[in-house]
Amino acid sequence: MRFLLDDEQRDFARSLDAMLTAADTPAVVRAWAAGDTAPARAVWARLAEAGVFALAVPERHDGIGSLPTELAVAFNELGRHAVPGPVVETVAAAALLDRLGTLGDEAAAATWLPGIASGKTAASLCLISGPGAGSGSGPASGSGFGFGFGESPYALDADSADAVFVVDGDTVRLTEVAGPVQPSADPARRLSRPLGGTVLARGPRVSAAAAHAAEVAALATAAQALGLGRALLARTVAYARQRTQFGVPIGSFQAVKHRLADALIALEFAEPLVHAAALALAANAESSGAEIAAAKVSACEAACSAARTALHLHGALGYTEEPDLSLWIRKARALRGAWGTPAACRARVLAP
Amino acid sequence: MDLDFTAAEDAFRAEARAWLAAQVPPAPLPSLETAEGFAAHREWERTLFADRWSVVSWPEEYGGRGASILQWLIFEEEYYAAGAPGRVSQNGINLLAPTLFEHGTQEQRARILPPMASGEAIWAQAWSEPESGSDLASLRSTAARTDGGWLLNGQKTWSSRAAFADRAFGLFRSDQDGLATGKPHRGLTYLMFPLDADGVTVRPIGRLDGKPAFAELFLSDVFVPDQDVIGEPGQGWRVAMSTAGNERGLTLRSPGRFTAAAERLTALWRDHADPADTALRDRVADAVIRARAYQLFTYANASRIAAGSAIGAESSLNKVYWSELDIALHETALDLLGPYGELSDEAEEAPAHGSWSEGYTFSLAGPIYAGTNEIQRDIIAERLLGLPKGRQ
């Protein structure tokens, strides 16, 4: 056993980190929120060049995957830099199409996967009523309002995505029309209801593929949340060292220290859950559903608590929109509910 | 990156599992914090030792198997999954032995370790004093030079297992200059002494449930020969702290203890909980998730150690995590038990032979001993996050 990222995976993370630092992602996020997609598509192209989307696409469709551990490494960095756009949805759509392909529907896979791998296609995916539909997505398994694990009426960034896939029960549709954008608490997330569309596939294999896609989406979201939380903690530690009150840095006060220590503890113990979930997914293990759910809820709760700590320790500044910090704080809350609410994740951990 | 065990590790697990299945007493032993239970647990240590399972990570010459950290973790997983008794020798095995391996003499190791491994000599710790808890370095019990050794005087307290143990180890002030010059860590000496020596008075203290889990020690001119000093006189703080990370981090509470408890909690929940009570379900899920997280975090640490890294302040992350998990897990179990949750572990009708109740009482001490969780959070903030020193 060597339960540590290897040198190559670490180098991959470092190079993405450097690239995204240079890309000035806060400006990219603000542009995206205002409807200007060009800067984010430029970042998208560079991520594709680095192989990020190809990690979710198999070799027979011009990808290099699927490689869940590397995907988790990459999404950790995307989260650290709050990269906007349907990044999670694109790799989840790739997982859906890939699985549909291996189950016999190669046409859709061949049509869309090479473009996803190359970065040409930004896709969105939405499970209106997904894998649990009809089998009692009640309070024991669901996310409230009758939605099951990973289900939502909204597709992320459907207004700008090149392809929007919608799973409704055992049917997957490709839609071209989206309803009006419903602003999210995270300005970088543009939500809308996908409308109409043409049927791509139908039947039990759609349900199976959608369940797989929801797992990939939950894993990618967990990794993204982890990176987001790390960035929030790092910024807040730096602030607590530099901000002085009563003549000393506020970071020397025990009450401040202990909040930051707790934020670190939550992130440190969520990280191995994310790595183990990626390994379980890679091995197609029976436990992958529970492992991914454990990672999702732990990473998202760690990110949210890091966001609360960041907000609080920055004082009124943390409650202000203008600093870049606000982009990270608001994303943490949105990711918590996306692709598996805390309750849905906990139910899945204990599912027999 | 992987979570795979080798064929040899799988074989080791199978061997441990088979041995435990054959040897673990069918009913739990009486609480090790009672005279009767202490004796029964001492006997169990002898059974473990007879087949070389009491100290698997030690070298073979002292009764161990030279097991790797990962093998030790495997053993612990199997041990607690099998419902095996608590370890009455834990203070010696986890705290004193690592110190002897690092700072002891060959003579000390040969004399002290085998009887520790067999349960013949059970050790208590003598760190805290009435006026020195978290601020341990301010301790005032003294070791004064005498012909061929040292004379101990003073008072130790919260000495775990000391009510029934045979020997104790701890820190004593052998030079007063450190205290006078504001450098209290200086001038401390690490010594071992028998609890039945002349001049030692042991006064057992009842923990929250009344069992004498620890004791006060009154020392009056207790003679300790030179051969029972560990490391150099005056260097006791450095000697003690070099293995403190062991206690907080890897060895004090292994993940197997919590993964096994989480499994038992899940079984209890499946058998007895109201399925509509999703609040309780979420707490059970959290216990399962956190036990798994602690296990995985420890696998990562074991991998780091195997790759040549040392674990330092990171051990404080473990200490806070497992101690809070332990309480949350047992509180959940007691809530799940409904009217049976308040029964003492001594009640005839207490579910699971009182193990949830006993485990809960035991867990409450976790955030206090081995450095309080406030001290641990200070360490995390200052050494891992780089925040400035200061405790206002």
Image (spheres, coloured by chain):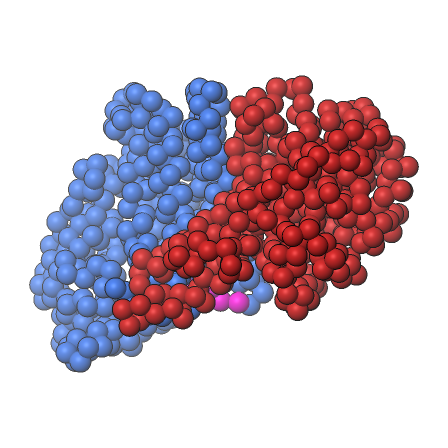
Chain colours: A red, B blue
Which range of residues does the magenta coloring cover?
B309-313
Is B310 magenta? The answer is: yes
Query: Predominant secondary structure in magenta?
Result: loop
* Residue A70 in the image, given as x and y percentages of width and height: 70, 54
Identified at 51% across, 59% down, the residue is A322
Depth check, front residue: B65 or A293: A293
- Quadrant location of the C terminus of chain B? bottom left
Identified at 56% across, 30% down, the residue is A143
- The image quarter in which residue A297 lies: top right
* Residue A69 in the image, given as x and y percentages of width and height: 68, 52
Instruction: Tell me: residue B360, above or below residue B70.
Output: above
Can residue A192 be seen here? The reply is yes
The reply, left or right, for residue B143 in relation to residue B292 is: left
The reply, left or right, for residue A198 in relation to residue A46 is: right
- The image quarter in which residue B324 lies: top left
- Quadrant location of the N terminus of chain B? bottom right
Identified at 26% across, 54% down, the residue is B124
Depth check, front residue: B365 or A30: A30
Depth check, front residue: B100 or B362: B362
